[in-house]
Amino acid sequence: MSHPPKVDVPDHRSPHRLLTYRPVGTLRLVGDTTLPPQPLVDALVFDWGGVLTVSVPEFVGAWLHAEAIDREVYGRVMREWLGRDALPDNPVFRLETGELTVAQFERLLAAELITTSGAGIDENGLLKRMFGGATPDPAMVELVRKARAAGLHTALLSNSWGEGYPKDLLLELFDTVVISGRIGMRKPDERIYRHTLDQIGVPAGRAVFFDDAPINVEAAQAAGMHAFRHTHADDTRATLATLGVNL
């Protein structure tokens, strides 16, 4: 079957350049070699919270406000438990590797927090309430859906705070799912990136990873993956385009 002809038309932004118009597809500058002609990656790997969902500050902030939890105290606890200098046996690490149950972690966290009203904090269901606003980001869901439909291998690599994932959506979006608490490893441990790549079946250089935490991005880069910090669906889509993945 013959393809529609290409037509060169002036670029109104710069009359000295021509744009090649394709009836199906996108506009591209004649001679433009800034984007790879073929994808440089075969697999797209995504974090969950803050990447496939609304941002962490957004949904955690809503929970802090709803329960009148002292933000400074919460911030201090998270720095101690999640910061770069956090001790390896702290509650978050133990939760994410499955050593602590959700109920055990909730008890420990509730004991550290205070409210601005002086009311007590109910430890039961604390994480469910904390993550209650972590709704999927429609733009990112659509991006991953298109990637999988295009034949790219899509994978989830998530540090778990329990098992509150939307199972049907994960089945729809991902070929491979790696949840830290199920395998006893967590980001930024290099082993979990190696494990994920083994599950996918591609070398590190043929996979790209997106996470909202810089330390996890740096660890993926150290493992040989293309890796970038996610901030917004449009930025992630633009980054993928530099790797030859146009969604």
Image (spheres, rainbow, N blue to C red):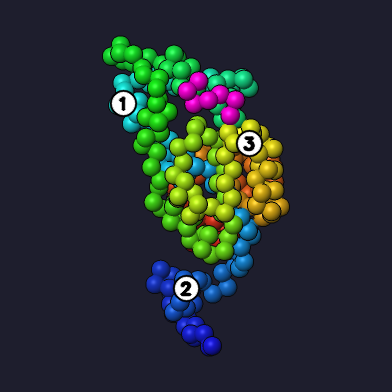
Image quarter in which the N terminus is found: bottom right
- Tell me how many marks there are: 3
Task: Name which residue type carries label 3.
Answer: Ile
Residue identified by numbered label 3 = 183
Q: In this view, does 195 lie above or below 114?
A: below
Q: Earlier in the sequence, mark 2 or mark 1?
A: 2
Q: How crowded is mark 1: few (under 14 residues within 10 Å), some or many (20 or more)?
A: few
Task: Name which residue type carries label 2.
Answer: Gly
Q: In this view, does 16 lie above or below 210?
A: below
> Which residue is drawn at the image coordinates 51% and 39% (left, top)?
212
Disc 2 secondary structure class: loop
- Residue 1 visible in the displayed image: yes
Q: In this view, does 125 lie above or below 73?
A: below
Residue 174 picture location, percent across and down:
53, 52
Q: Is residue 84 magenta?
A: no
> Which residue is drawn at the image coordinates 30% and 11% (left, top)?
118
Residue identified by numbered label 2 = 25
- Of 38 and 166, nearer the camera is 166
Residue identified by numbered label 1 = 65
Task: Name which residue type carries label 1.
Answer: His
Q: Which of marks 1 and 3 is nearer the N terminus?
A: 1
Disc 3 secondary structure class: helix
Tell me the distance, in whole angstroms, between the alpha carbons under discs 1 and 3. 34 Å
Mark 2 or 3, which is nearer the eye? 3
Residue 70 picture location, percent across and down:
36, 18
Q: Earlier in the sequence, mark 2 or mark 3?
A: 2
> Which residue is drawn at the image coordinates 50% and 20% (left, top)?
104
Q: Residues within 10 Å of mark 2 (few under 14, many from 20)?
A: few
Residue 218 picture location, percent across and down:
62, 38
Tell me the distance, in whole angstroms, between the alpha carbons under discs 2 and 1. 46 Å
Magenta span of residues? 98-104
